[in-house]
Image (cartoon, rainbow, N blue to C red):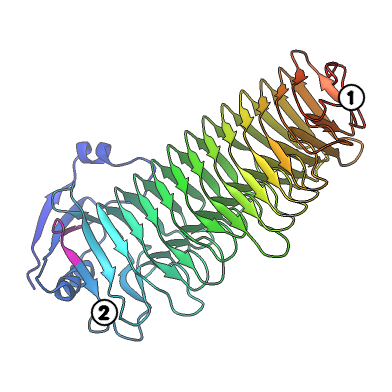
Amino acid sequence: MNLQRSTRAATVGAALAAISLFTAPTPAHAATIAADCNANPVTAGTNLKNAIASAVSGDTVTLVDYCIYAFNDSNVPAVDESALTIDKTLTIDTVSGANTATIRRIKTAHDFRIINITTGEETGHLTLNHATVQFGTTLDGGEGGGINLETTGTSLQTNNATIEGNKASRRGGGIFAVLNSGSVELNSTVVRDNATDTNDGGGLYTNAATTDVNDCTFSENRARTGGGGIYVANIATTLTVSGSTFKNNTAQTGGGLLVVGGAMDMSNTVITNNLASRPGVGGAGGGLYITVGHPASITDSQITGNKATGNGANGGGLNVSVSEANELLTVANTDISGNETIGAGSHGGGVAIDGFSPTSTLNFQNSTISGNHTAGDNSAGAGLYRFDAGTTSLSDVSITDNTASGTGAQVGGVYSDALGNNSELVFSGVSITDNTAPAAPAPGGLYTDTAVTDNGGNSVTGNSPTNCTYSPVVPGFCTSLP
């Protein structure tokens, strides 16, 4: 083993180059420690372990470009649950700062995760750059197969990293962040093919105060219950997602993401080909399931080609649940298309809303809900299904070419079922066209049992078997009746 340590003074320029959202303290002097590669990947893994052990807070451990640092029973004792422990402020990066290296568990080894960020004499803060974390597996009941933020205040930042092929017995197949951990920040990171055996968060399960996901891809992750890609568990968590893609993830609820009550700001993001499937009661939120407990927004995004399956499935693309008072969700400049619910009694191929707060507001603006499908006997609302006690407002929204199919299926366009006397449906510049459902007695375009507040510019045309005929309430703008 050859550990090389070189001391350098931190400069103002280096501080300015640091990513501002990651606020772990850096000492006045830091060192670079080389983790040598070896023809035997397990020897290289031991070198990495020793380099981390010899580092002090603020140091950087460098990996050799393209090297594989491997762990098995020979360098991870059977009593250890993790290959590497981080209990200081540390950066791990490749020598080039551009090419990648791999940190992996050999699959024939006993079960252990790859990295545990914890508190010893100091609190662990890890910046992981240009590295792949691979094949970690927790013990029964364990969490965070790839990376585990174990204690309060710990933090993780990744840049150009890959978290791949890890598995947790309970939560967080790829990454797990404990309640009151400080922050998780993922930048240009791929989270792929991670899984949980019994619980939530196939790719990432987060309780962190802030979780930022920037220019990342979550794909082929699997959760036994909720949040195939990401599960946000804490109402106090703020989730920010920008420029990212969620594809081919699966769970029972929230195939792509499941957000339970925390604030969310999502922009320029693609959620596609995810699946929520639950036998018996049906999956919900094929692309995204959000419980609105704090203000949340989705802007300039695409929710396409997702599915929720099983009898009673809801929200093939997007499922919104509201139970808290005075909460707000805004969906703007977003395409919700080609999503599907499959199963008897399924609702909302594109969007399903279950709102139980009379003071909540859901706003859809400058968006398209098109080409969505509900398939199953007695299914309803292929474009948008609403069972809401609060206000749902649609402004400059196009709802087109959605189809409900199956015996007794109703309404290809919008199905609105008011919950309580304060429920309100507001339209401004809404076009509901060319949606279809089976034969009457139910419309193909718009069904509502409460009056629609008409702010002008609305139309319901070209729907089959009718536009609004057989709706309990027929708005004044729905005058083009078959």
Along the line of sight, the residue nearer the viewer: 68 or 337: 337
- Whether residue 207 is visible to the viewer of this picture, yes or no, is no
- Which percent across, then down, holds residue 356? 81, 46
Placement of 92 over or under 416, stated as above or below? below
Element class at badge 2: loop
Q: Which of marks 1 and 2 is nearer the N terminus?
A: 2
Given the image, on which type of amino acid does mark 1 rest? Answer: Val
| Figure disc tally | 2
**Residue type at tag 2:** Asn
Picture quarter with the C terminus: top right
Query: What is the quadrant of residue 1 in the picture?
Result: bottom left
**Of residues 8 and 302, the one drawn nearer to the viewer in this rendering:** 302
Residue at numbered disc 2? 72
- Which segment is the magenta one? 60-68
Q: In x, y percent, where is residue 29? A: 18, 52
Q: Which residue is drawn at 12% across and 50% down?
A: 8
- Mark on residue 474? 1
Relative to 435, residue 89 above or below: below
Residue beneath the point at 18% across and 41% down? 11
In-image side of 420 versus 229 (left or right): right
**Percent coordinates x, y for residue 211 in the rendering:** 48, 48
Residue 45: % across, % down: 20, 71
Q: Indicate left or right for 164 with 325 as reference.
A: left
The quadrant holding residue 328 is: top right
